[in-house]
């Protein structure tokens, strides 16, 4: 159960969130919990979750270890502040910051090199769904962004299916739509990495997940977890998603 805070919350707001959130999820044994705050909040978030069952992730990383890359942050740097996870290829990175399937793969390899666990985001845009291109888009994103990993590398990642038209819009994919997309992705996992990997991998759904739709989404056997934006900003709301 992962939360993506996007560009929200200051350090004091981050600390206040975890004071409220940690006790609410302390008994959650059925899942791993990860929150991905902005870079400048990572240290405070790691400190505020020390000794708890809540892991911290970043929202992006650059693929070089270090160098003259103004404004960028490496996997090693994220690891050194205590991150365990990192989002890669979020649709907002693809849409506004020129992320491509090729740069997704570079970032994933860099994350794995730094011993971080990438959550790789894929998903179709509205016009692609309406044009009947959903499967083709997912296959393309999978092939170029994930397909180049080894079986061992693949075992370290999670995949998030986030239909772009459902992000921040209040429009959730129907459970059947989410399950269909997850089946397409899982079949790609089987073809590239084998049956065992396809059964053990975790595919998260993201896009307007809220406390009132979590049950029906997670009831789909294909949906292994969720990646939550807006509803992860409030401690009570995200805790009730975690504890569905
Ligand atoms: P919302 O839950 O706000 O739709 O955002 C989803 C998302 O983009 C998570 O990465």
Image (cartoon, helix red, strand yellow):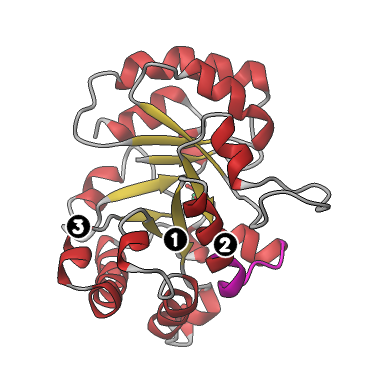
Q: Is residue 64 left or right of residue 27?
A: right
Q: Is residue 102 part of the magenta span, yes or no?
A: yes
Nearest to viewer (mark 2 / mark 3):
3
Q: Nearer the viewer, residue 74 or 13?
A: 74
Residue tagged 2? 91
Tag 3 secondary structure: helix
Which residue is found at the position 65% from the left and 66% from the top? 99
The residue nearer to you, when weighing 77 against 122, is 77
In the image, residue 21 sits, relative to residue 81, either above or below, namely above
User: Going by the image, does 71 lie left or right of 179?
Assistant: right
Labelled disc at residue 217:
none
Which badge, 1 or 2, comes first in the chain's sequence?
A: 2
Which residue corresponds to mark 1? 162
Q: Is residue 54 magenta?
A: no
For the residues labelled 1 and 3, the Cα–Cα distance comes to 20 Å
Q: Position of residue 175 (x, y in %)?
A: 26, 60
- Which of the numbered marks, if any, corresponds to residue 200? 3
Cβ–Cβ under 8 Å for marks 1 and 3: no
Q: Residue at x 41, y 69 (%)?
A: 149
Mark sitting earlier along the chain (2/3): 2
> Image height check: is 108 above or below 148?
above
**Relative to 243, is 72 on the left or the right?**
right
Cα separation, mark 1 vs mark 2, equals 8 Å
Q: Is mark 2 within 8 Å of ligand 1?
A: yes
Magenta stretch in the rendered image: 97-104
- Quadrant the N terminus occupies: top left
Cβ of mark 1 under 8 A from ligand 1? yes
Please indicate whether residue 117 sits to the left or right of residue 92 in the image: left
Q: CA distance from mark 2 to mark 3?
A: 25 Å
């Amino acid at each position: 159960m992962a939360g993506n805070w996007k560009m929200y919350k200051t350090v004091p707001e981050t600390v206040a969130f975890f004071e409220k959130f940690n006790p609410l999820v302390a008994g959650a044994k059925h899942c791993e919990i990860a929150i991905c705050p902005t870079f400048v909040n990572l240290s405070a978030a790691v400190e505020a979750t020390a000794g708890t069952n809540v892991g911290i992730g970043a929202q992006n990383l650059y693929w070089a270890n270090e160098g003259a890359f103004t404004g960028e942050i490496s996997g090693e740097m994220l690891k050194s502040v205590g991150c365990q996870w990192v989002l890669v290829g979020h649709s907002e990175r693809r849409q506004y910051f020129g992320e491509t399937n090729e740069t997704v793969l570079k970032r994933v390899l860099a994350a794995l090199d730094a011993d971080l666990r990438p959550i790789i985001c894929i998903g179709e845009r509205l016009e692609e769904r309406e044009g009947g291109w959903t499967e083709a888009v997912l296959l393309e994103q999978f092939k170029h962004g994930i397909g180049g990993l080894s079986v061992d590398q693949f075992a370290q990642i999670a995949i998030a299916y986030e239909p772009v038209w459902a992000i921040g819009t209040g429009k959730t994919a129907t459970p059947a739509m989410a399950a269909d997309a997850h089946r397409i992705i899982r079949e790609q996992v089987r073809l590239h990495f084998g049956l065992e990997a396809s059964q053990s991998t975790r595919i998260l759904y993201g896009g307007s997940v809220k406390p009132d739709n979590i049950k029906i989404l997670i009831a789909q056997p294909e949906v292994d977890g969720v990646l939550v934006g807006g509803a992860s900003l409030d401690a009570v709301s995200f805790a009730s998603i975690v504890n569905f």
